[in-house]
Image: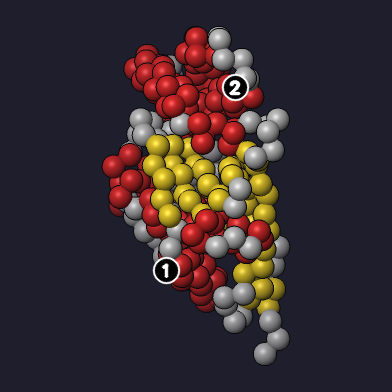
Amino acid sequence: MPKKKIYDFSISATSLVIFQTCPMQWAYKYLFKPIIVKVPQRHMVLGNALHTLMQHYYHRWEELEWKKTWLIDSWEDCYKHHFLKAKLPISNSEIISGKEHLDWLHGALEKQGWLKPAFQVKDKSGIEYSFKFPYNGHTDFIVDIIGKIDLLQKNSVIDVIDWKSGSNQGNIIDDVASSTQLLIYSAALKKVLDINEENLYLVYIYLHEIRKFTVGNELFKLIVQQVNALLDAYAVQEYQCIKGKHCQYCDYKIICKAETSQRI
Ligand code: SF4
Protein backbone atom coordinates (compact mmCIF):
# COMPACT_ATOMS: atom_id res chain seq x y z
CA MET A 1 0.00 0.00 0.00
CA PRO A 2 1.47 3.42 -0.89
CA LYS A 3 2.33 5.59 2.08
CA LYS A 4 0.03 8.51 2.82
CA LYS A 5 1.62 11.86 3.57
CA ILE A 6 -0.02 13.55 6.56
CA TYR A 7 -0.90 16.77 4.73
CA ASP A 8 0.99 19.89 5.74
CA PHE A 9 1.77 19.49 9.41
CA SER A 10 4.64 18.10 11.37
CA ILE A 11 4.55 16.86 14.96
CA SER A 12 6.28 18.99 17.59
CA ALA A 13 6.79 18.25 21.26
CA THR A 14 4.16 20.89 22.07
CA SER A 15 1.54 19.34 19.79
CA LEU A 16 2.19 15.90 21.24
CA VAL A 17 1.79 17.18 24.79
CA ILE A 18 -1.52 18.83 23.79
CA PHE A 19 -2.72 15.57 22.23
CA GLN A 20 -1.91 13.67 25.41
CA THR A 21 -3.77 16.23 27.50
CA CYS A 22 -6.87 16.14 25.28
CA PRO A 23 -7.04 14.78 21.70
CA MET A 24 -10.03 17.04 20.95
CA GLN A 25 -8.07 20.12 21.93
CA TRP A 26 -5.30 18.95 19.58
CA ALA A 27 -7.84 18.50 16.74
CA TYR A 28 -9.26 22.00 17.31
CA LYS A 29 -5.82 23.56 17.37
CA TYR A 30 -4.11 21.75 14.50
CA LEU A 31 -6.90 20.49 12.24
CA PHE A 32 -10.23 22.29 12.53
CA LYS A 33 -8.76 25.68 13.51
CA PRO A 34 -12.04 27.37 14.45
CA ILE A 35 -11.89 31.17 14.63
CA ILE A 36 -12.14 32.08 18.29
CA VAL A 37 -11.09 35.01 20.45
CA LYS A 38 -8.12 33.86 22.53
CA VAL A 39 -7.82 35.25 26.06
CA PRO A 40 -4.20 35.45 27.30
CA GLN A 41 -3.55 32.98 30.11
CA ARG A 42 -1.96 34.35 33.29
CA HIS A 43 0.60 31.58 33.65
CA MET A 44 1.72 32.03 30.04
CA VAL A 45 2.12 35.79 30.40
CA LEU A 46 4.07 35.22 33.62
CA GLY A 47 6.30 32.64 31.91
CA ASN A 48 6.94 34.98 28.98
CA ALA A 49 7.88 37.84 31.31
CA LEU A 50 10.36 35.63 33.19
CA HIS A 51 11.85 34.24 29.98
CA THR A 52 12.32 37.70 28.48
CA LEU A 53 14.11 38.96 31.57
CA MET A 54 16.28 35.85 31.89
CA GLN A 55 17.30 36.11 28.26
CA HIS A 56 18.72 39.62 28.82
CA TYR A 57 20.35 38.44 32.02
CA TYR A 58 22.10 35.46 30.45
CA HIS A 59 23.39 37.55 27.60
CA ARG A 60 25.08 39.81 30.13
CA TRP A 61 26.47 37.01 32.27
CA GLU A 62 30.05 38.28 32.11
CA GLU A 63 29.08 41.58 33.75
CA LEU A 64 29.15 40.00 37.19
CA GLU A 65 29.23 43.12 39.32
CA TRP A 66 25.77 44.45 38.67
CA LYS A 67 23.67 41.69 37.23
CA LYS A 68 21.95 40.43 40.42
CA THR A 69 20.72 43.91 41.34
CA TRP A 70 19.72 44.52 37.75
CA LEU A 71 17.80 41.24 37.61
CA ILE A 72 15.78 41.84 40.78
CA ASP A 73 15.19 45.54 40.05
CA SER A 74 14.10 44.93 36.47
CA TRP A 75 11.53 42.26 37.32
CA GLU A 76 8.69 44.58 38.36
CA ASP A 77 8.95 46.68 35.17
CA CYS A 78 9.19 43.62 32.97
CA TYR A 79 6.21 41.97 34.74
CA LYS A 80 4.05 45.09 34.43
CA HIS A 81 4.96 45.57 30.80
CA HIS A 82 3.80 42.04 29.90
CA PHE A 83 0.60 42.10 32.00
CA LEU A 84 -0.51 45.54 30.84
CA LYS A 85 0.10 44.53 27.23
CA ALA A 86 -2.04 41.40 27.80
CA LYS A 87 -4.69 43.56 29.54
CA LEU A 88 -4.54 41.37 32.67
CA PRO A 89 -4.64 42.67 36.28
CA ILE A 90 -1.33 43.17 38.10
CA SER A 91 -0.76 40.95 41.16
CA ASN A 92 1.61 42.18 43.87
CA SER A 93 2.07 38.65 45.21
CA GLU A 94 3.26 37.51 41.76
CA ILE A 95 5.73 40.39 41.68
CA ILE A 96 7.06 39.46 45.14
CA SER A 97 7.32 35.72 44.43
CA GLY A 98 9.00 36.51 41.09
CA LYS A 99 11.66 38.53 42.92
CA GLU A 100 12.24 35.67 45.38
CA HIS A 101 12.59 33.19 42.53
CA LEU A 102 15.04 35.38 40.62
CA ASP A 103 17.11 35.91 43.76
CA TRP A 104 17.31 32.15 44.27
CA LEU A 105 18.02 31.46 40.60
CA HIS A 106 20.85 33.96 40.50
CA GLY A 107 22.49 32.22 43.49
CA ALA A 108 21.93 28.76 41.99
CA LEU A 109 23.46 29.73 38.66
CA GLU A 110 26.50 31.23 40.36
CA LYS A 111 27.05 27.98 42.26
CA GLN A 112 26.37 25.64 39.32
CA GLY A 113 29.05 26.52 36.84
CA TRP A 114 27.98 23.75 34.48
CA LEU A 115 24.69 25.49 33.79
CA LYS A 116 25.95 28.97 32.90
CA PRO A 117 27.18 28.42 29.35
CA ALA A 118 23.80 26.98 28.35
CA PHE A 119 22.50 30.49 28.15
CA GLN A 120 25.48 32.29 26.70
CA VAL A 121 25.16 33.17 23.09
CA LYS A 122 28.80 34.19 22.71
CA ASP A 123 29.99 30.82 23.95
CA LYS A 124 28.73 28.35 21.36
CA SER A 125 28.57 25.54 23.92
CA GLY A 126 25.14 26.83 24.82
CA ILE A 127 22.83 27.09 21.85
CA GLU A 128 19.26 27.06 20.71
CA TYR A 129 19.15 24.07 18.47
CA SER A 130 16.45 23.57 15.78
CA PHE A 131 15.77 20.05 14.62
CA LYS A 132 13.67 18.15 12.12
CA PHE A 133 13.79 14.43 11.56
CA PRO A 134 11.50 11.85 10.00
CA TYR A 135 9.44 9.60 12.24
CA ASN A 136 9.34 6.08 10.86
CA GLY A 137 7.42 4.30 13.60
CA HIS A 138 4.03 4.11 11.86
CA THR A 139 3.23 2.05 8.78
CA ASP A 140 0.61 4.42 7.29
CA PHE A 141 2.16 7.85 7.57
CA ILE A 142 5.26 9.85 6.81
CA VAL A 143 5.71 12.47 9.49
CA ASP A 144 8.43 14.94 10.51
CA ILE A 145 9.24 15.59 14.15
CA ILE A 146 10.26 19.22 14.62
CA GLY A 147 11.28 21.54 17.44
CA LYS A 148 13.81 23.83 19.10
CA ILE A 149 15.94 22.99 22.15
CA ASP A 150 18.08 24.88 24.64
CA LEU A 151 21.05 22.63 25.17
CA LEU A 152 24.46 22.59 26.70
CA GLN A 153 27.27 20.54 25.25
CA LYS A 154 30.35 19.67 27.30
CA ASN A 155 32.80 17.33 25.61
CA SER A 156 30.65 14.36 24.61
CA VAL A 157 27.96 14.99 27.25
CA ILE A 158 24.75 16.86 26.41
CA ASP A 159 22.26 18.44 28.81
CA VAL A 160 18.79 19.17 27.44
CA ILE A 161 17.40 22.06 29.44
CA ASP A 162 13.86 23.13 30.19
CA TRP A 163 12.93 26.08 32.33
CA LYS A 164 9.79 25.74 34.46
CA SER A 165 8.12 28.88 35.67
CA GLY A 166 4.82 27.23 36.70
CA SER A 167 3.88 26.79 40.36
CA ASN A 168 2.71 23.17 40.06
CA GLN A 169 6.09 21.67 40.92
CA GLY A 170 5.00 18.54 42.76
CA ASN A 171 3.49 16.68 39.82
CA ILE A 172 6.14 17.79 37.39
CA ILE A 173 8.92 16.45 39.57
CA ASP A 174 7.17 13.07 39.91
CA ASP A 175 6.95 12.47 36.19
CA VAL A 176 9.81 14.54 34.87
CA ALA A 177 11.72 11.46 33.75
CA SER A 178 8.95 10.60 31.30
CA SER A 179 8.36 14.16 30.15
CA THR A 180 7.22 13.99 26.55
CA GLN A 181 8.80 17.29 25.67
CA LEU A 182 12.26 16.44 26.96
CA LEU A 183 12.12 12.92 25.57
CA ILE A 184 11.37 14.28 22.11
CA TYR A 185 14.28 16.65 22.45
CA SER A 186 16.52 13.81 23.56
CA ALA A 187 15.32 11.61 20.71
CA ALA A 188 16.17 14.43 18.30
CA LEU A 189 19.68 14.71 19.66
CA LYS A 190 20.16 10.98 19.58
CA LYS A 191 19.00 10.85 16.00
CA VAL A 192 20.56 14.01 14.60
CA LEU A 193 23.82 14.13 16.56
CA ASP A 194 24.15 10.38 17.02
CA ILE A 195 24.55 10.65 20.81
CA ASN A 196 24.23 7.65 23.15
CA GLU A 197 21.65 7.71 25.95
CA GLU A 198 24.37 7.56 28.60
CA ASN A 199 25.70 10.92 27.40
CA LEU A 200 22.32 12.62 27.55
CA TYR A 201 20.75 14.34 30.55
CA LEU A 202 17.43 16.10 31.03
CA VAL A 203 17.73 19.21 33.17
CA TYR A 204 14.69 20.94 34.67
CA ILE A 205 15.04 24.36 36.26
CA TYR A 206 12.15 24.85 38.68
CA LEU A 207 11.16 27.80 40.78
CA HIS A 208 13.48 26.74 43.61
CA GLU A 209 15.28 23.71 42.37
CA ILE A 210 17.44 22.34 39.54
CA ARG A 211 17.02 18.64 38.75
CA LYS A 212 19.01 16.48 36.41
CA PHE A 213 17.91 13.08 35.02
CA THR A 214 19.38 10.42 32.79
CA VAL A 215 17.45 9.15 29.76
CA GLY A 216 16.90 5.39 29.55
CA ASN A 217 16.27 3.51 26.33
CA GLU A 218 12.92 2.32 27.69
CA LEU A 219 11.74 5.90 27.88
CA PHE A 220 12.30 6.41 24.17
CA LYS A 221 9.73 3.67 23.53
CA LEU A 222 7.15 5.91 25.19
CA ILE A 223 7.59 8.45 22.42
CA VAL A 224 6.82 5.81 19.79
CA GLN A 225 3.61 4.87 21.64
CA GLN A 226 2.56 8.48 22.03
CA VAL A 227 3.17 9.46 18.40
CA ASN A 228 1.37 6.32 17.21
CA ALA A 229 -1.66 7.11 19.39
CA LEU A 230 -1.87 10.51 17.69
CA LEU A 231 -1.54 9.04 14.19
CA ASP A 232 -4.08 6.30 14.93
CA ALA A 233 -6.65 8.90 16.04
CA TYR A 234 -5.92 10.95 12.93
CA ALA A 235 -6.32 7.91 10.65
CA VAL A 236 -9.89 7.28 11.88
CA GLN A 237 -10.68 10.95 12.58
CA GLU A 238 -11.80 10.22 16.14
CA TYR A 239 -10.75 12.58 18.89
CA GLN A 240 -11.59 11.93 22.50
CA CYS A 241 -12.47 14.77 24.87
CA ILE A 242 -10.50 14.42 28.07
CA LYS A 243 -11.89 16.72 30.72
CA GLY A 244 -9.91 18.02 33.64
CA LYS A 245 -8.38 21.05 35.30
CA HIS A 246 -6.66 21.85 32.00
CA CYS A 247 -10.06 22.75 30.48
CA GLN A 248 -9.94 26.12 32.24
CA TYR A 249 -6.89 27.02 30.12
CA CYS A 250 -8.26 25.57 26.86
CA ASP A 251 -8.85 28.12 24.07
CA TYR A 252 -11.76 26.02 22.78
CA LYS A 253 -13.83 25.55 25.95
CA ILE A 254 -16.50 27.92 24.59
CA ILE A 255 -17.23 25.59 21.68
CA CYS A 256 -16.25 22.23 23.17
CA LYS A 257 -19.29 19.91 23.44
CA ALA A 258 -17.92 18.19 26.55
CA GLU A 259 -17.69 21.56 28.28
CA THR A 260 -20.87 23.23 27.00
CA SER A 261 -23.09 20.18 27.69
CA GLN A 262 -22.05 20.33 31.36
CA ARG A 263 -22.91 24.00 31.63
CA ILE A 264 -26.44 23.56 30.24
S1 SF4 B 1 -12.48 22.17 26.95
FE1 SF4 B 1 -11.43 20.42 27.86
S2 SF4 B 1 -12.43 18.62 26.95
FE2 SF4 B 1 -12.93 20.38 25.66
S3 SF4 B 1 -11.36 20.42 24.05
FE3 SF4 B 1 -10.68 21.75 25.70
S4 SF4 B 1 -9.40 20.47 26.97
FE4 SF4 B 1 -10.62 19.10 25.71
- Image location (x, y in percent) of residue 13: 54, 54
Callout 1 secondary element: helix
Q: Does label 2 or label 1 sit earlier along the sequence?
A: 2
Write the residue at 68% across / 81% down: 3
Above or below, comparing residue 44 to residue 185 in the picture: above
Q: Which amino acid does label 1 sit on?
A: Glu
The relative height of residue 156 versus residue 64 in the rendered view (above or below) is: below
Position of residue 197 in the picture relative to residue 213 (left or right): right
Judge whether residue 126 can be spotted in this image.
Answer: yes
Which numbered mark, 2 or 1, is in the foreground of this view? 2
Is disc 2 in contact with disc 1, using a CB cutoff of under 8 Å? Answer: no
Residue designated by label 1? 218
Residue lying at 39% horizontally and 42% vertically, measured from the top left: 211
The single residue placed furthest to the bottom in the displayed view is: 1
> In the rendered image, is residue 80 in sight?
no
Q: Circle 2 is placed at which residue position?
A: 61
The x, y position of residue 21, in whole percent, is 41, 55
Cα separation, mark 2 vs mark 1, equals 38 Å
Label 2 Cα crowd, 10 Å radius (few <14 / some 14-19 / many 20+)? some
- The image shows residue 86 at horizontal and vertical percentages of 54, 25
Q: Which residue is drawn at 56% across and 54% down?
A: 185
Residue 77 position within the rendered picture, expressed as x and y whole percent measured from the top left: 53, 12
Q: Which residue is drawn at 41% across and 18% down?
A: 103
Q: How many labels does the image show?
A: 2
